Amino acid sequence: MTASPQHAARDEQPAAEPDLSARPRYKNPIAVLLRHRNFRLFWLGQTGSVIGTWMQSVARGWLALQLTNSPFMVGFVSAAGSLPVLVLTLYAGVVADRHEKLRMVKVTQSLLLVEATLLWWFDWSGHITIVWLVVISLLGGTFTAFDIPARQALMVELVGREDVVDAIALNSSGFNLARIIGPSVAAIVIAKWGLAWCFGLNALSFLLVELGLFMIRLPPWARAAAVGSPMEGLVEGLRYMWRTREVRLLMSVVAVYSIFGIPYLVLMPVIARDTLHSGAQGYGILLAAVGVGAVAGAVSLAMAGHTLQRGRLLRLSTYFFCAFLVLFSLSRSLWLSSVLLLAVGLTMIVNNALANGLLQTIAPDELRGRVMAAYAFVFVGMGPIGSLLAGGVADVVGAPAAIAIGAAVMLLFVWWMLGRRRELHHL
């Protein structure tokens, strides 16, 4: 496929410095929520639903450990939920750029409700096996592969380009607020009613997001004329990302973060049970601690506004994230581990929100769905590699050592990559 003259010219140059109007402008961290009715409906529904999603995540990891007693299988089940994202999400980005994003999100959220209901029924009826758990996780990952790029690209339509970075930070705070509430509620539900009802309550929580989505009112969607086949559209997006140095650099950092940094969450059930000897309740406390730190990080980022030099902060947040992970791997106290995870959560969300926000600010409107699909590809889709790698290493040397090794590898890469490259320093 031959790129259009505009795209060809743009591909020859590094991304222009983003307009300052696209940077956060508010000292009030919830100003964007008050300003935009559509985003408010989206945020409230998503935050409520993600509480259920975190409950399901806790229950699924614990169920995998109960069924197999294997850290590797805990990682394998997590990988099964991410593998379809790796395979399908780049194509899903082309679909998102060529179809109405709001309608696409409504469909994918409805399908995720079905997936949660299946998990509830299989566990409640006593038919659940590790095979069924993997199969249903694959099914949910398939729906998620199409949901992520459409939902991420929808953000600009809800708030406008000038407020998108604020919206991403606030959306991250809602996600991590749910990370606090979800595991805590899951621990209570597991203790009183069993794992199955975490899946059942997650299914009910999807009704919240569906209600919010159906109340959103956007201007009539005009179908853009598709140029070329979906494969040609995919190639166009990949060519832009490869030739735009800032985007390529950000994607490489996100990929290493996903493979070597994020798996500490996958191994959390093993840490809670075998290292800290705290059971499902301790597991919930650890995840809640990550969430508290992440909410603090997201709110702080939104309050700081455009005064931040975001490229430099991205580098520093990554260094501190790795350092706190190493310290966490050395802890054998539940409460010390929780305190360290507060810091891990804070630096993690600052890193995530900055990378996502920089990509959304740099990407042109006509390619945003594909750029967000690529972000999901490396952030979520690379998860199976990290989960399997971390699970395999944990089987050999233990979960704490696996977390420390991953953090060390990530630290060395980011020090080498961001320390010697200057492309992000002006952003």
Image (cartoon, grey):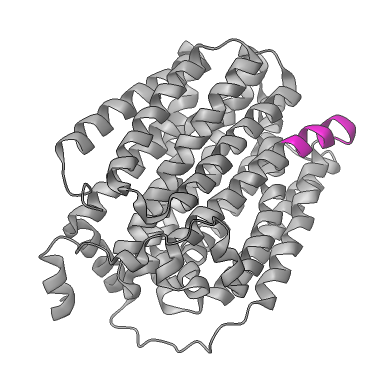
Does the rendering let one see residue 382? no
* Predominant SS along the magenta part: helix
Above or below, 288 relative to 393: below
Q: Residue at x 73, y 20 (%)?
A: 279
Residue 150 lies in the magenta stretch: no
Q: Residue at x 64, y 45 (%)?
A: 177
Which x, y percent locates residue 82?
50, 46
Q: Is residue 6 left or right of residue 134?
A: left
Q: Is residue 374 left or right of residue 425?
A: right
Q: Residue at x 78, y 32 (%)?
A: 187
Residue 186 lies in the magenta stretch: yes
In this view, the residue farthest toward the right is 192
Give the magenta range: 184-194
Q: Is residue 7 left or right of residue 111?
A: left
Viewer-nearest residue: 85 or 308: 308
Which x, y percent locates residue 235?
25, 66
Viewer-nearest residue: 286 or 169: 169
Quadrant where the image shows the N terminus: bottom left
Q: Is residue 256 left or right of residue 211?
A: left
In this view, the residue farthest toward the front is 27
Which x, y percent locates residue 78?
56, 38
Does the rendering let one see residue 176? yes
